Amino acid sequence: MSRCETPADSPGLPKSAEGDPVFAEPWQAQAFAMTVRLHEQGMFTWAEWASALSREVHRPGRADDGRDYFDCWVAALSSLVSERGVASEAEQDALSHRWERAAEATPHGKPILLENAPD
Amino acid sequence: MSHDHDDHHHQDNHFSPMEARVRALETILTQKGLIDPQAIDAIVETYETKIGPRNGARVVAKAWAEPDFADWLRRDATEAIASLSYTGRQGEHMRAVFNDAQTHNLVVCTLCSCYPWSVLGLPPVWYKAPAYRSRAVIDPRGVLEEFGVTLSPDKKIRVWDSTAELRYLVIPERPAGTEGLDQAALADLVTRDAMIGTGLALAPEARP
């Protein structure tokens, strides 16, 4: 039987010498983990994931050295979430901005909660 | 402050557009029942032990082996760590706090986003839990006991609260019996928890 491919096999994913993915910042690991989970639950196949990621990586204006690889990853995840009718890009944009406002309204040492965002 | 960062470091907390986007996706997917944040943490946890803390371990090993570097680290950790090219993307400042016979150091935060990723990789899930932060401040000795670290009662514990602008790296005490080891072997003794202060450096016989 052929091996199952998962988002962890994505081309270009930075990996350590032991073959584990390498993340520079926590949000990258979060995005990676969400993708792995959605794939496990059958929201998309590996081929669908690979094609969405590839579309983002090859979009004009992307960095040549792959330093924005996880930006592409998040964009691919966003577009699949939108295509599957879970939430439109506009809804995702609005919620992202609300999270930004929530972070800025939260004093140091307090949990950043969505309801902290000023209206 | 003498630094001219013209961006967003004046706020206590800030999400980059990517952080905010990932939070938004997490919120939507959780609300729709498509992911469970605990399952996501569990996936992250399986990777985190392998990815981050080796940079910090090299800093500690160098400080143990080279007194001049240790002095530099004590005076200006930001510069000393930058000399090894382990610099955060956000230009945060680092301070190294040294354990010694009298004092043990313990670092807390982050309910927000304060963790020295550039040297320690990803924060462990327990570090992000509100329980750790509040208990570490109120009862650091009890928290350390839970991590299996029992300090002599006369040892002082200093708790350092990270901020978005200043992050701490604990330099653990060098274990006995390590005189013959080179820096790479020394770095193997430095665990992530030892650099947060919830652990001690490993004895040479416990080397992985």
Image (spheres, grey):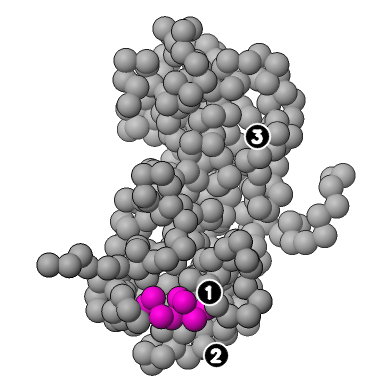
- State left or right for residue B180 relative to residue B205: right
Residue located beneath label 2 in the image? A90
Q: Chain of mark 2?
A: A
Can residue B168 be seen in this snapshot? yes
Choose mark 2 or mark 3, whichever is in front: 3
Residue A57: which disc?
Answer: 1
Chain bearing mark 1: A
Whether tag 2 and tag 1 are in contact, CB under 8 A, the answer is no
Query: Which residue is rendered at x = 69% and y = 47% of the image?
Result: B92
Query: What quarter of the picture does the N terminus of chain B occupy?
Result: top right
In the rendered image, residues at marks 2 and 1 fall on the same chain: yes
- The residue under the point 55% across, 25% down is B60
- Residue B82 picture quarter: top right
* Three-letter amino acid code at the position of disc 2: Ala
Whether residue B129 appears in this view of the structure is no
Label 3 residue SS: loop
The alpha-carbon separation of the residues under discs 2 and 3 comes to 42 Å
Q: Secondary structure at mark 1?
A: helix
Please state the extent of the stretch shown in magenta in the rendering.
A49-56
Marks 1 and 3, how far apart in space?
Answer: 31 Å
Q: Label 2's element?
A: helix
In-front residue for pair B123/A118 = B123
Pointers 1 and 3 in contact (C-beta within 8 Å): no
| Amino acid type, callout 1 | Val
The quarter of the picture where residue B176 lies is top left
Residue bearing mark 3: B84
Q: Amino acid at mark 3?
A: Leu
x and y, in percent, of residue A76 in the image: 47, 78
Where is A97 relative to B109, above or below?
below
Between discs 2 and 1, the one toward the N terminus:
1
x, y (%) of residue A63? 63, 68
Q: Is residue A53 magenta?
A: yes
